[in-house]
Amino acid sequence: MGWVEALLQKSRDRTLTKGEVLHSLFHMIEVNESTLNQIETNKTDFGPELEELKQTEIRDLNFHLKYYRSLVNYINLVPENRVIENRT
């Protein structure tokens, strides 16, 4: 995940902390979970074509949730002292 480390480096260069990056990711997870919940609980019958679109949207949201959670897990593995070391 070299590109994630590059993203973290850019974040460090802009003085974002590891906590701020994680906070952003947690916010994205919360937004996606909320949207997914709204879509899944909407029982309106829009017909087969829009049902297919709804299922596609659900798959996309689930993919993004897995993606954001994997980033959180990866970033949490980076020791705080390594983040601070790279800032200087």
Image: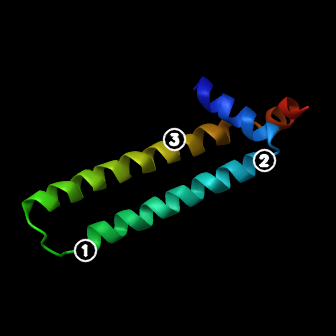
Q: Comparing marks 3 and 1, which lies closer to the viewer?
A: 1
Say left or right for 31 vs 7: left
Q: Amino acid at mark 1?
A: Asn
Quick one: label 2 or label 1, which is nearer the N terminus? 2
Which residue has dot 3 on it? 70
Q: Please say whether residue 20 is visible from this viewpoint.
A: yes
Q: CA distance from mark 3 to mark 1?
A: 28 Å
- On screen, residue 54 above or below 72: below
Question: Between residues 82 and 2, which one lies in front from this camera angle?
Answer: 2
Q: Amino acid at mark 3?
A: Ser
Q: Position of residue 75 (x, y in %)?
A: 65, 40
Q: What quarter of the picture does the N terminus occupy?
A: top right
Classify 5 as above or below 59: above
**Left or right placement of residue 65 versus residue 48 in this view:** right
Q: Identify the residue under disc 1.
A: 42
Q: Residue at x 29, y 54 (%)?
A: 57
Q: Quadrant of residue 63?
A: top left
Image coords of residue 61 (percent x, y):
37, 53
Q: Earlier in the sequence, mark 2 or mark 3?
A: 2
Mark 2 and mark 1: span between their CA atoms?
Answer: 38 Å
Circle 1 crowding by C-alpha within 10 Å: few under 14, some 14–19, many from 20: few
Which residue was labeled with disc 2? 17
Kind of element beneath mark 3: helix
Q: Which badge, 3 or 1, is on the more N-terminal residue? A: 1
Percent position (x, y) of residue 32?
A: 44, 59
